Each structure stands twice: as structure tokens, then as C-alpha cells.
Image (cartoon, grey):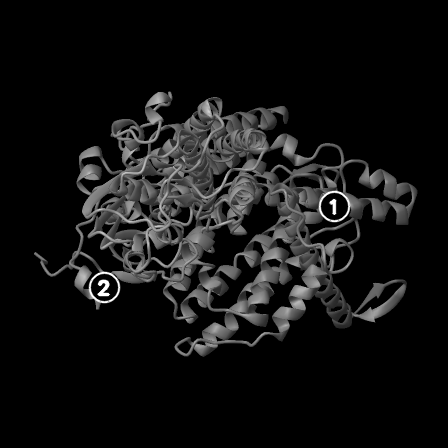
Amino acid sequence: MVTSTPEREFETQELLINMGPQHPSTHGVFRMVLGIDGELVTEVVPYIGYMHRGAEKLCETMDFRQGVGYMDRTEYLANFNAELSYVMAVEKLAGIEVPERAQWIRMILCELNRLSSHFMFTGAFGTDVGVFGTAFVYSFREREVIQDLFEEITGDRLMYAYFRPGGLGWEVPDNFEQRVQEVLLSAERGIRDMDGLLTQNEIFLARTKNVGVIDAPDAIDWGMSGPSLRASGVPMDIRRDEPYLYYPQLKFDVITGETGDVFDRYYVRLQEMRESVRIVEQCMERLRPGPILPERMPRMLRTPPGEVYVRTEAPRGEFGIYLVSQGGNRPYRLKIRSACLSNLQALRDMTIGHYVADAVIILGSIDIVLCEVDR
Amino acid sequence: MNVELFGGEINVWWDALARLGLAVGAMTVVAMGLIYLERKVIARFQQRLGPTRTGPIGMLQALADAVKLVGKEDLRPRNADPWVFELAPYFVFVPIFLVFVAVPFAFDWQIRVLELGLLYVVAISSVNIVGWVMAGWGSDNRYAMLGALRAAAQGISYELPLVISLVAVAMIVSQLDSAGEVLRGSLNLHTIVEEQGHIPYIVWQPLAFAIFYIAMLAELNRTPFDIPVGESEVVGGPFVEYSGIRWSMFFLAEYTALFLLSLVGAAVFLGGWAWPLGEELRGENELLGVLYQLGLTLAKTGFLIFTVFWVRSTMPRMRIDQLMAFSWKVLLPLAFAQILVNGLILVYDWPDVLLLLTSGAGLVALVAIVDRAVTRPAQRPPRPAAAALGSEAAS
């Protein structure tokens, strides 16, 4: 009996490929080393930190109002949502009452920002899946309309720095209501287009269904939040569970997925955009004239000693600000709880066992913003 | 040996050289035109304008690109295999241009009427896979390597359905022999086109055309089968290390291949220059007829190319396993079934309408299979045991 027949004729070796920090679909300077066996991914080693700027430390060196600008630079696709967490933390610590009108405008802007951020996601995700730019351009058409509105309001296209502890920087333009209606109309058109271009495309479905599955217990264990968590079927939405602003007065649904695959993460976001449109419409009905800052605001904002943690539902999940003050006009310690960082942790679990092409769309489906991950 | 050309006698070698020179020149122009057209067409699909600045409505954009590419430094990575790296573009470029020899444009507009023209076309056009693998291997880049392996796998897999769908047509071509008897089967592209004067073969063989078109997209590495060059995955695949003139040769070959395969599709399935009324018009007026035939060929080719651009601007990319499964489990069996049925019909002399009916049924089956495959959830591949790679990768 011949026993020396080798089981495998050829020695095969795993190939390590270095994806990023310069790679078109790592959404920034993210790097992951993939160990691949043929086309199958056997190991994923993510590296983060290429974008570390020390935003938290920088915030500790300037006074409370200046910190708003650093929130824009941290979460540059959902600036208003990031600013909101920060100003709410400062307000909570300093005990500032915010006028009603300012709160409603904050809600409108945050939801519009959620729309624009999710449009960014659908566009970039379409490119990841391999649509040659068409999804991207269609998304950006709608995103551009929202961006124009933000520019009219804040004077800046990217770094708005519009929220202030206590309210807003200045009053919105006179035609605000009409402009918001226009934006909503175009956003609805954009959502329909995405449905037609991606959701109903057979190849898109074949690529995304049952890929990168993460079930609910695992998703919770990894600390995922936002649409990525809801896609796994966990109905957790801070807007509903831990209400802030005036969300309890509004009617909106918490969208959840079923299997927690890439398709669900995409589809939850798409449906969430419809909910955002609903929320903005309700906010517009309730918007009344009034002051946008409290009547008595100190020239130099000082807080009593103490610590707070405020979290809000940003487009990518729980964006939290942990603020410690020892009195005085600047934070003693500021910690940003990044939604993307936590969501990214599940990447290895989701990717191993899939194909190289899937690694790209799984990363895309988490919708990371590297500035927020690395801070 | 001399041949007749424009009424005079000319040495056959000079004749061949002149024709080849004409072919290369024409194809370069065609490729640049296609690059411009693709940018314009896709731009319109994306609500953009595309190039507008260079020349009237941006028509000289491709020329400007070419000048830029020629002016660029010809870089070669230090660890690249010099011979393999530098020769690879020619292995992609030359076979594609050789295909040009056998394709028919109009009744008398064909560089050489080859008796085995169809065989020649499919045989030569698949040589360029060697060039792709050489480019991937020689670049000493892992993305390039991955892309090259993908290209090889895909090229081989889709070559088969492509060839067999063409065979399905080649076997039903009818021609009269010298004794006036009807003979079936020809690989001569001229004959194949000529026989479609009344009804193009897409009517008789819709399934074969569908398979040909899908396989053509894959052969050309076009969306949704652009896996070897997938920008968002392997960043350009085998070409990732190429720059300047060498890269532009790949690019030129890609568009030339697009034109030529579309031309073959137009000739074999859509009636080429013969349908409708190509021959009749030529019988009345030689010059007008040839121009009309040329226009017919180019219009049909242009239509196929336009659909390729159309698909590219709307379809996502497939995954490598889906791609392979689609070729081996769906397209190839259907293509074989097609030639089997065709063979039965020919051998037993059944009426020709059966060709249409069986092929149409096959097309319905193809659509049904694709539909079912999409609606049925895919299986997650088995999770391989994660090797202790972390430490190695980290170092």
C-alpha cells in the first residue's frame, strides 16, 4: 500500500495583501491587511490611526464655544449631529435652557444632515459594489442641494460651526421654510432613484444578500450602534429610547433589518432617509418664530465642576461626548465616543470567509468616517 | 505573386502591408473615437456633460489624452521582471489587431476572406489573455497578480460559451455548392453575412445571441464582468503598475477589442452589411451600395457598443464565484444544448422554424435561471480556520 501520496500536490501559501491606506475603497486612510487563500479572505488585520489629530486634546485647550469647530472636523459628513452632541453636553453641564425655536431648527438641520450623510453612503457604496459612478453622481446631485441649503444658512459648505452652547449662531434666512421644502422634494427623488438603481438591481442583490452577516448578539457585543446595529434586528434608536430635543413629540419609525447582512445595512439606511424626510416635515409644521439664543448668555461661558455624558443618534450611530469640567471656561477632559470606531470592530468577524470583493463592500456597508474613527 | 488592386497589379506582400497599415491606422482612430464616445455617453447617463473643452464639444479629448500619455515617463517597478513586464502590452495589443484581418465591413471590404474566418477570430482574440497574465505576473504587485489570475480564470471560462454560441450559428449557415445542393455550415464570415440577406441569425438563434453578448461583455472585461480590473477592489488589476505609453496600449487594445467583438456580433447575428437590402442596393449602384453596407455594419456595431456603455453605467460588478458559476453552470450547458438541438434539426432535416422555437425556449430558460438564482439566497462559503496570521501581518 502506498502511503506516501501527499494530500495536496501543491504547497499553497496565503497571500497577504495590503489594502490601504491608499486604496480607492477604504473611504479614507484606513488600512487593512488581508490574508487571502485564492480569493477567500482568511484573515483581516485592520490598522487605524493614520488620521489621528488629537481632536479631543485640542478641545481641552480652547473654550467651550470654540470646541464646536472641532466637532465639524471630527465627523465631517454629519457635522450638525456631532455639533449637537457637543453643545448639548456643554448646555447640560452649564445648565443652559435652549429656546424652543433653536431646538426645532437644530432638529431640522440634524435630520437634513442625516439625509446628506446617507446620500454620501449610498453613492460611495454604489461605487464599492461596482456601479461606475452613476449611483455616486445621482447621490451627489441630491447631496449638493442639501449642501447648498447649509451653505446659505451657515456660510460654509463643510465646516458649519453653526450651533452654539445655548442655541444657534444666528437666525436662519427668511426663505428657510421654502428652501427646506425644495430640499425634501429633491431628497425624495434621490431616494426613489437609489431604489431603482441599486435596490432593484439583480446583481446588486446577488452581491449584497447574505454577505457580511453579523447577528444581533454579536453586534451588541462589539458595541455597534446606529443603522449597522439596527440592520441586525436590534431596534435601538437613541432618538426614541433616550429622547432628546423634541423627538418624543414626533412620529417616526425605527427601521430594523432582519439578517444583518450588507444588504440590510444598506436598506436600513435607505429607509431611514424616508423617516428623516417625515421628521423634517413634522418639524416644519411646529416651527414658530422666537429667539434662538437665551436672553442672558454670559460673555465668557463657564461651567461648574462636574462631568456629563451626552449621546445622540448620529447617522452612523451613537455619537457621545463625555465632558469633565473642573470649573472655568474650558473642558478639563473631553472624550468623543465614536460610532464608527465601535462599528469597525466587527469588521474582522464579518469579513473572514468571504471573498476579497466582499471585504470591500462589507467595509463600505459599515459607512466609516476615518476622521471620526481616529479623532 | 501579384493581386489586383484598384484596377492595377500589385505584389501580394505590398498589398498585405498596405491593408495592415490601413487597419492599424483606422483602429487607432476608432479606439480614440470610442474613448471619447464612452466618456460622453456615460456622462449623459450620469447627468454630466463629459469633455467639452478640447476641440468642438470636446472631440479632441482622446487626442489630448494620448499626447499626455505619450509624454509621460515609462516607469517600471524595480522588482518587476523586465522582459515580461515590457512585452506584456504587445501580447495584448497585437492579437486584437490581427483579428481585424478577417472581419467583414462590406461586400468587398474585408482584408482577407478567410475560409475559417470565425475560427481565426475567436482563436486569435483569446491570445491576449496571455498578455494580461504576463502584465500581472511581471509587475511584481499583488493586486496585479490577483487581477491577472482573475483575468485568466474569466477569460478561459467565457471563451467557451462565446465560441459555442458562434458555432451554433456557423452550423446552420446554408450555402449552395457548385452542384446547386444546399450545404449547411460555414466558418467563412463573408458567407455567414451574405446568408443573412433576408433574416438575420438573431431571429433564428436568440439564445445564442444572448450567450454571445454576455460572454462578449466578460471577454472584454466590461461591467458587470470587470472583475480583473475592478477599480474598487484590485485598483486596475494587471495594469496597476503601468503608466504612459504602455498603459495606453492596453487601453487602446481594450477599445479595439470592444469594436471588433461588437463587429463580429453584428456580422454573425445582426446581419452585418447584408440585412436589410444590402445586396440589392449594391446591385443597382456599386458605390452607393458599398457605402450603405458600410453604414449598416457600423450602425449595428455602434448599437452594440452603445449597449455595452449603457450596461457599464448602470450595473454593479459581479463577484468572482458568481461569475464562474454563471459561465460553467448556466451559459455553457445552454450553449451546448443549443448546438445539440441545432444538430438534431439539421441531421433529421426538420423545418427551420424549430431552430427559432427551441432557441427562444432556451432564452426563456436563461432568464428564468438568472431570476431564480437571484431570488434564492446565496450560500455563505465555509469559513476557513483562521490561521495565526495576525502576528505575521503585523510585523
Q: Quadrant of residue A319?
A: top left
Whether residue B295 is visible, yes or no, is yes
What is the chain letter for disc 2?
B
Amino acid at dot 1: Thr
- Image vertical order of residue A103 relative to residue B300, above or below: above
Mark 1 or mark 2, which has the lower sequence index? 1
Left/right of residue B219 with respect to residue B372 in the rendered view: right
Q: Nearer the viewer, mark 1 or mark 2?
A: 2
Measured in 3D between alpha carbons, the distance from the residue under mark 1 to the one under mark 2, in whole angstroms, is 55 Å
According to the image, label 1 marks what residue? Answer: B297
Q: Position of residue A8 (x, y in %)?
A: 20, 57
Residue at image x 66%, y 46%?
Answer: B41
Dot 2 alpha-carbon crowd within 10 angstroms: few under 14, some 14 to 19, many 20 or more: some
Whether residue B330 is visible, yes or no, is no
Image quarter (top left, top right, bottom left or bottom right) of the N terminus of chain B = bottom right
Dot 1 falls on a residue whose secondary structure is helix
Q: Position of residue B82 (x, y in %)?
A: 45, 78
Amino acid at dot 2: Ala
Q: Position of residue B269 (x, y in %)?
A: 65, 39
Left/right of residue B49 with respect to residue A159 in the rendered view: right
What is the chain letter for disc 1?
B
Dot 2 falls on a residue whose secondary structure is helix
> Which residue is more in the foreground, A110 or A362?
A110
Dot 1 alpha-carbon crowd within 10 angstroms: few under 14, some 14 to 19, many 20 or more: many
Image quarter (top left, top right, bottom left or bottom right) of the C terminus of chain B = bottom left
> Which residue is more in the foreground, A330 or B260?
A330
> Which residue is more in the foreground, B269 or A126?
A126
Q: Position of residue B153 (x, y in %)?
A: 41, 53
According to the image, label 2 marks what residue? Answer: B393
